[in-house]
Image: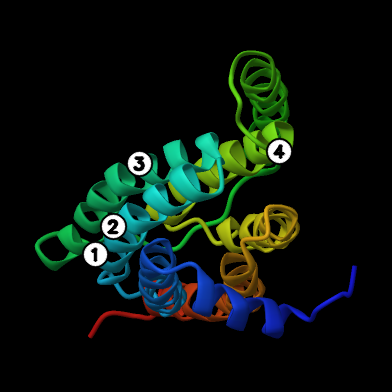
Amino acid sequence: MESISLWEAFLQALENEGFFYISELLAVITGVIYVVLAARNNSWCWFWGIISATFWAYAVGVIFGLYLDAFLQVFYIVMGAIGWYQWTKGEKEEQLAITRLSLQEHLGIIGIGLVLGLLFGYLFDEYTPAAATYLDAFTTVFSMAATFMVVQRKLENWLYWIVIDALYVYLYLTREAYLFALLFVVYTVIAALGYWRWKKEMALEREASHAPSK
């Protein structure tokens, strides 16, 4: 079978997928807006995240058979509303500051994530026709954990997203979801930039908090 490039596959998808492609395209466009705004620490990211997750849930569930990923998008919709409230309540109260995770918190997240990933991977592999169950389970569980970190403005959320996004590139390529795979290449880069930007903002916040009051 003649191999094709990622770009050629993208153009082929654009030509052949029709209606199904529209939901994928809208999920990608609004998803890019979400992650760029999140990296810029802009509360409007949650609005676009909710829109993206809505289209994404349909695309991955109906088109690509990734049931856990579809469930994850429903979770994103709920967390989008919570995140929007958490980030914007700073307009009335003291804004939530960027903070770091402790080593104990990292170990807890990774340990629980591995256990839940194995559990959900087994259950969906045994009892559903879902595709790529174990990888889908691990990316889903850790994506949920990373989303909680974003809501709480934990700096290291971006380090988790770099790994998660890279795994999603592989997952979507195996499902021939080339547009989503291309998007997660972009996401991986933006996550690295987001970490750098948040780290810089955290340093500025600390300097401001230690500055003598006038």
Q: Amino acid at mark 3?
A: Val
Q: Residues within 10 Å of mark 4 (few under 14, many from 20)?
A: some
Mark 4–mark 3 distance (CA, rounded to whole Å): 19 Å
Counting labels gives 4
Earlier residue among tags 2 and 3: 2
* Numbered badge on residue 74: 3
Residues tagged 2 and 1 counted as in contact (Cβ below 8 A): yes
Left or right: 111 with respect to 155? right
Q: Amino acid at mark 4?
A: Ala
- Measuring from the top left, give residue 133's x and y in whole percent: 68, 32
Judged by depth in the image, the label closer to the viewer, 3 or 1, is: 3
Q: Amino acid at mark 1?
A: Phe
Q: Which residue is mark 4?
A: 132
Q: Residues within 10 Å of mark 2 (few under 14, many from 20)?
A: many
Front residue of 76/133: it is 133
Whether residue 11 can be seen here: yes
Residue at x 87% of width, y 75% of height: 3
Residue at x 47% of width, y 78% of height: 201
Q: Is residue 63 above or below residue 96?
A: above
Residues tagged 4 and 1 counted as in contact (Cβ below 8 A): no
Q: Which residue is mark 2?
A: 50
What SS does tag 3 mark? helix
What SS does tag 2 mark? helix
- Measuring from the top left, give residue 9's x and y in whole percent: 68, 76
Q: Residues within 10 Å of mark 1 (few under 14, many from 20)?
A: some
Residue at x 45% of width, y 42% of height: 70
* Numbered badge on residue 47: 1
Q: Residues within 10 Å of mark 3 (few under 14, many from 20)?
A: some
Mark 2–mark 3 distance (CA, rounded to whole Å): 9 Å
Corner quadrant of residue 174? bottom right
Judged by depth in the image, the label closer to the viewer, 4 or 3, is: 4
